[in-house]
Amino acid sequence: MPTQTHHHRVLRSFGPLGLVVIVCGSAAAQQARPLAGRTSGSADWPVYGGNTDNTHYVTLSQISPGNVKNLKVAWQYDTRDAFDGSEMQSNPIIVGGVMYAMSPKQRAFALDAATGRELWSFDPTGRRFTGPRIRYRGVVVHDGRVYFNYRYRLFALDAKTGLKVPGWGNDSGWVDLRAGLDRPVEGLSVSASTPGVVYKDVLIIGTSVPEALPSAPGDIRAYDVKTGAIRWTFHTIPRPGEFGYDTWPADAWKVNGGANAWSGVTVDQKRGLVFFSTGSASFDFYGANRLGDNLFANSIVALDANTGKRVWHFQVLKHDLWDRDLPAPPALVTVTRNGRRVDAIAQITKTGHVFVLDRETGKSMFPLEWKRMPTASLAGEVAADSQVFPVLPPPFARQALAESGLTNRTPEARASALKVFREYRTDHPFQTPTTQGIIIFPGVDGGGEYGGPVFDPETGLLYVNSNEMAWLLKMVPRNDRTNYGMHCASCHGDNRQGSAEGPPLNAVAGRLTREQLTQTIREGTGRMPAFASALDNAGISDMVNYLLTGVDVSTTAATNPFYTPYRSTGFDIFLDHEGYPAVAPPWGTLNAIDLNRGAIRWSIPFGEYPKLNAQGIRGTGTDNYGGAIVTRNGLLIIAATTYDNRIRAFDKRTGRVLWEAELPFAANATPSTYMVNGKQYVVVACGGGKNGAPSGGVYVAFALP
């Protein structure tokens, strides 16, 4: 229920820090057109990404290249919900002068978009949030309702009051995302990290499920916006008789999971087509129990939005063994090819490629080439013999790593990088996982990431921010049959020390109670699978005892269908001895790609390390998460960088910085832009928490004086 007190939580003195709110135009709710370019009155940011084209393009012009340098903090809102390791990736929705967003503890709230004053707050946990970190990217606002997700619960709230809508879903006022999966739901971890999209009278949404086993399938579903009833379902792991069933072993859908559209969906409202792109199948680094191409994992799919029936598909990567999810939903673009205008979709990848496909047929607008791939190294595995790549546009990230591409920051840094590099296999960019270890480059966080691309229809330019870091992956046989060794070590380390995939657990007794640990292990959360179907009550109890005491007396025989003979260990970013990326800069870039010509217009380093700046080392770029906004009058506005806590406005033609401001925490989220009472704002969520950066929970809005 909503909290009983409506705290304003507005700080007028911003100083050098803050959260950015971006206001850029208006669009009729759920219409796939850019925000209107009015300079008076009001203009909304009505859907995730600004419009259902998912292009982040706006025509509002009050903030311009000539005056953007005058932007000042208009207000900031501190959620007071940050905790160690938390993130906040929400793209705020603004409708009718009200801003709707989420806090690090997944509290939904509404603010006066002109002042930042809190109007209402809804805590789905009843003020009992116990963690761990969960990542959600916002809410859906439609026809007086706010739809948002907390773990497996999909809520509908009254947009004016924040109260649950009577008659939505079950008697408790929510829809269970685990229901309707056509297989046992007990203990499955299913959530929705990215908000869905409304088409006519249905809410179409993808899900987030674990990348390890046990895992739920990534079905795409359409829910009735009035009642919460499922209107249609598309199976991303095909059932018998469905297209693609023969690309998996028989009855794989009963065991395998993943192939999910965790990054969201895009709807062509005029054509009645819904587009989505999927991630890898679970388990993502070893696939002997899912031999085959694995449709519709790592695929772009177009469905009839009225029925959920497949119209076309394009598989970007067959039998993924590298966690190379498609990281963002397709953007609806229009390009000029052979002298004619063609409606298309643009899909970015973690490997730094852009696929441009005809929107109605799925045919590539540029030539494709198939390349032979290495054979599998692990027993029982069979890798795809070839993979497809676009000839144009050229990749926006480096494609291979050699010794010459390692860091030269200091002699000591290079020596530490060389030592690790020579211990791992680096024969081929698609070297399959091995027990010796491989280096994945671009890494599992991109190339492109969840912020997605930005498209300017005036120029045909696609803007993409990219990560340029390598990751280390090593596989080991499951010789350790203890509960922890079988189920947890892949993400949390052999000695509970943690990794990029999971937090350390060697001191978890000081953070969580026995009851909280039991619930998390049983139900799962975010990317962590639930273990209720893999461990009985005694097994879960043994696991909790081990985490609390460090003594593991349990063993688990490999008798369940989710067992695999290998697990990953040492899965993390490739860093030098001082914690900086072990490859040569740039470590992050911002790129402008001409989709008409298939050429990169410009590319610049993106982001700074303040500690390196103090040493005179600049222009390195950093890892970056979160997207941008592009305006018709010439601006590209983006935060995203992990360590310098900045938001910047660039000249979209050249990549020259026109304005920047400091934020209280890194803003790994896409800004929003809107207008209230004739004033244009830019707003962004400053949540931090990425790759060791400090965590926060502040929203900051900017406007002209």
Image (spheres, grey):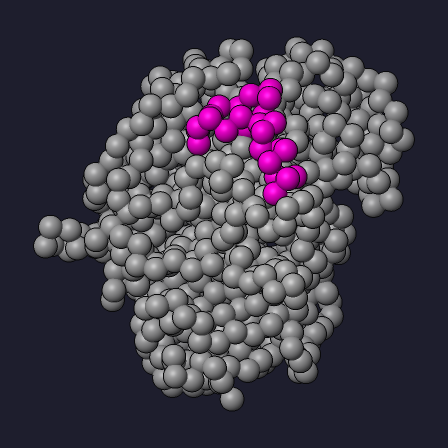
Q: Nearer the viewer, residue 340 or 311?
A: 340
Q: Which residues are magenta?
A: 414-438
Q: Is residue 471 above or below residue 244?
A: below
Q: Which x, y percent locates residue 128?
A: 76, 52
Q: Nearer the viewer, residue 61 or 154?
A: 61
Instruction: Give residue 103's quadrant in the image.
Output: bottom right
Q: Residue furthest left?
A: 339
Q: Residue at x 83, y 32 (%)?
A: 547
Instruction: Give residue 65's quadrant in the image.
Output: bottom left
**Quadrant in which the N terminus is drawn:** bottom right
Q: Residue at x 53, y 15 (%)?
A: 378
Q: Is residue 122 above or below residue 467?
A: below
Q: Which x, y percent locates residue 705?
A: 51, 89
Q: Is residue 599 toward the left or the right of residue 107 in the image?
A: left
Q: Is residue 440 visible?
A: yes
Q: Nearer the viewer, residue 39 or 606?
A: 606
Q: Which x, y percent locates residue 366?
A: 21, 43
The answer to if 269 sits in the magenta stretch is: no
Q: Is residue 22 above or below residue 484?
A: below
The answer to if 420 sits in the magenta stretch is: yes
Q: Residue at x 60, y 21 (%)?
A: 436
Q: Is residue 527 visible?
A: no
Q: Residue at x 74, y 53 (%)?
A: 84
Q: Residue furthest bottom?
A: 705
Q: Nearer the viewer, residue 564 or 661?
A: 661
Q: Which x, y percent locates residue 8?
A: 69, 76
